[in-house]
Structures are given as structure tokens and as C-alpha cells.
Image (cartoon, rainbow, N blue to C red):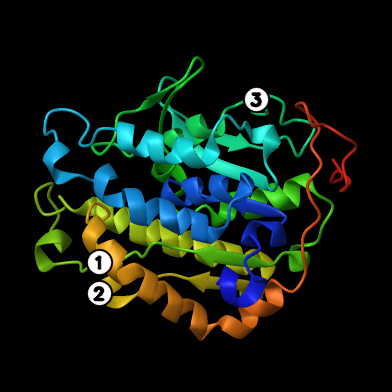
């Protein structure tokens, strides 16, 4: 997409706000670190097999060693903190100690004081700490779990933040929403009768219905014509998150096809570049470009 529409420039420079959960959070942080989507793709192509190495699977502990993920993310993010970001961010996670949502945000509003100094690598490891797959990520302040527990599709996180932080109308918002694929669950006769055993795969239903609900709510707020949704479909939506080989082989091709199907709308959205954000807190704090929303 960057090669065709942007001549190699990072797509992150064309958005005022980027929200991402789990793997999407890692991609959002890569863009905020000034990297291109091609850089993020390279991270997955070169490290996906090591991150989800079946030889390292441990049944009685968190499934995979976090070291390959940490090393791959650190190579891209380095020592950057959220106030170094080149685009506003909203990255969901869960505060395990307090059983509360934890939304990491760049300091693009006066109230967003506490995350400016959070290291991007810590935020990345927090939002990707999927239970059963990776250990919770511990920092000096938190024990953190994957943001997918509260906002697997974070489109409403982004919409609410934009409308509450800035003096803009709903119809001024345009969204490019990129998903990883949520296969439609098949409700069996056994499940319709109820019972814990029948619903052992309920996790898949949670993801699918939460995704649909978030997309529907965002479309209702800003207008469905203001949102582009790109996600794998069919068999490509069925690829297991730990199946790095299949993902590497099939998803780049599927992504190219999905983008081509709505290339005109995406090109129009990317026709202008967003202003670099100004932050209220952190070492780069300057006077904000956008005014506050009325209280």
C-alpha cells in the first residue's frame, strides 16, 4: 500500500490518531516510531516463526517464550517513549493487579499526564501479552495483559478519544479499520442446548461478535460511508494466530487483494498528510495545534 499510494513514505504520517490492540498495537507503535508498514511487515516475516516456535511451547506455563517478541519489537522501537511518537496513539491493555482497562495514550490531551514517559517497548509487550500464549508483562507500575481482553477491535476506542479530546464533529472523522480476521462462529445444536462442554470454543464467538459490534457502533456514530474496513475473509480468516508459516505464505497476498478492492477510497483518504501532533506533556511538549473540546 505504501509503495503504490505513498511512494515509500510511512502511512502513519497520514493519520491524526492510530489505535491498535495486540498485534495491531505493535504495528501502531512501529508507525509512531517513524517506521513504514513495510518495516512492520519485515518484522513479522523475519521473526514470526521464532515468536511462535512450536518447539518452545510450554503447557503448564505461558505458551511461548517472550524473548523473541521482545527482541523483534526492541529492534524497531528502541528506547523511544510515547511522547516521542510521530502520531497520536491509543493502545489498549489490561491492568491485571486492579482488574481494570489500561489505555496507553500519547499526551495529546491535558489530562493524559501519566503515559508520556512509558517506553514503547513496554506498551508493545503489554498489549500483546495474550493469556495462555505469553506471560503478563510486568513494569515498575503494572502487571499487564493483552488489550484484546477489552477491545480486540479498538475502533471505538479511537472514535471516543477523537470526539472527546478535540472540537470536531462526528462527520469530520474518517476511519481506515484493519482487522486480522474473525471467522463467523457456527452455533451447533449442542451449543443451543447450553452447557460448559459445548461452549469450550466460546472464545471465538467473543472475538467475532465484539468485532462486529465495535464496527457497527463506529459506523453508526460517524456514518458507514466514512469508514473503510479491511480484513481477511474466508479461509484466510481461519489461520490460527500461532501458525506463522501459513500467515507468512497467505496473508500478504490476501491483504493485497483486500486493499485493491477498495483502492480508490483508500487513495482518497491518503491524499493529505496529517500535521505532526503537539503534546501537552513530556520532553517535546509544545502548544497544541488542536483546541480542546468544550467541557
In the depicted structure, whether residue 55 falls above or below residue 272: above
The mark lying in front, picked from 1 and 3, is: 3
> At which x and y percent is residue 221?
65, 64
Alpha carbon distance from label 1 to label 3: 38 Å
> At which x and y percent is residue 35?
59, 51
The mark lying in front, picked from 2 and 3, is: 3
Q: Residue at x 77, y 64 (%)?
A: 273
Q: Residue at x 19, y 44 (%)?
A: 53
Residues under numbered marks 2 and 1 in contact, where contact means CB atoms less than 8 Å apart: yes
Q: Secondary structure at mark 2?
A: helix
241, 215: nearer the viewer: 241
According to the picture, the residue beneath numbered tag 3 turns out to be 117
According to the picture, the residue beneath numbered tag 1 turns out to be 238
Alpha carbon distance from label 2 to label 3: 41 Å
According to the picture, the residue beneath numbered tag 2 turns out to be 235
Q: Is residue 57 visible?
A: no
Q: N-terminal of the two: label 2 or label 3?
A: 3
Q: Residues within 10 Å of mark 1 (few under 14, many from 20)?
A: some
Residues under numbered marks 2 and 3 in contact, where contact means CB atoms less than 8 Å apart: no
Q: Residue at x 87, y 45 (%)?
A: 294
Which quadrant holds the C terminus?
top right
Q: Residues within 10 Å of mark 3 (few under 14, many from 20)?
A: some
> At which x and y percent is residue 84?
69, 36
Q: Secondary structure at mark 1?
A: helix
> At which x and y percent is residue 136?
35, 28
Q: Quadrant of residue 209?
A: bottom left
Q: Is residue 110 visible?
A: yes
- The numbered mark at residue 199 is none
Tell whether 185 sits left or right of 143. left
* Residue that sits furthest to the top in the current view: 140
Amino acid at each position: 500500500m505504501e509503495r503504490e499510494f505513498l511512494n515509500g513514505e510511512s502511512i502513519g504520517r497520514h493519520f491524526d490518531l492510530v489505535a491498535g490492540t495486540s498485534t495491531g498495537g505493535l504495528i501502531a507503535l512501529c508507525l509512531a516510531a517513524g517506521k513504514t508498514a513495510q518495516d512492520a511487515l519485515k518484522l513479522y516475516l523475519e521473526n514470526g516463526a521464532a515468536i511462535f516456535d512450536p518447539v518452545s511451547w510450554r503447557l503448564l506455563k505461558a505458551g511461548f517464550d517472550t524473548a523473541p517478541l521482545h527482541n523483534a519489537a526492541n529492534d524497531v522501537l528502541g528506547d523511544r517513549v510515547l511522547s516521542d511518537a510521530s502520531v497520536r496513539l491509543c493502545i489498549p491493555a489490561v491492568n491485571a493487579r486492579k482488574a481494570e482497562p489500561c489505555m496507553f495514550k500519547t499526551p495529546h490531551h491535558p489530562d493524559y499526564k501519566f503515559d508520556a514517559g512509558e517506553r514503547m517497548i513496554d506498551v508493545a509487550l503489554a498489549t500483546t501479552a495474550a493469556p495462555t500464549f505469553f506471560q503478563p508483562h510486568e513494569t515498575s507500575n503494572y502487571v499487564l495483559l493483552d488489550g484484546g481482553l477489552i477491545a480486540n477491535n479498538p475502533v471505538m476506542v479511537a472514535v471516543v478519544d477523537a470526539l472527546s479530546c478535540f472540537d470536531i464533529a462526528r462527520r469530520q472523522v474518517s476511519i481506515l479499520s484493519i482487522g486480522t480476521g474473525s471467522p463467523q462462529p457456527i452455533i451447533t445444536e449442542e451449543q443451543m442446548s447450553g452447557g460448559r462442554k459445548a461452549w469450550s470454543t466460546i472464545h471465538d464467538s467473543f472475538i467475532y461478535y465484539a468485532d462486529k459490534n465495535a464496527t457497527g457502533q463506529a459506523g453508526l456514530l460517524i456514518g458507514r460511508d466514512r469508514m473503510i474496513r479491511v480484513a481477511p475473509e474466508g479461509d484466510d480468516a481461519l489461520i490460527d494466530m500461532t501458525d506463522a508459516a501459513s500467515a507468512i505464505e497467505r496473508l500478504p497476498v490476501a491483504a493485497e487483494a483486500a486493499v485493491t478492492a477498495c483502492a480508490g477510497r483508500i487513495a482518497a483518504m491518503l491524499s493529505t498528510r496529517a500535521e505532526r501532533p503537539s503534546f501537552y506533556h513530556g520532553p517535546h511538549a509544545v502548544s497544541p495545534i488542536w483546541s480542546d473540546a468544550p467541557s
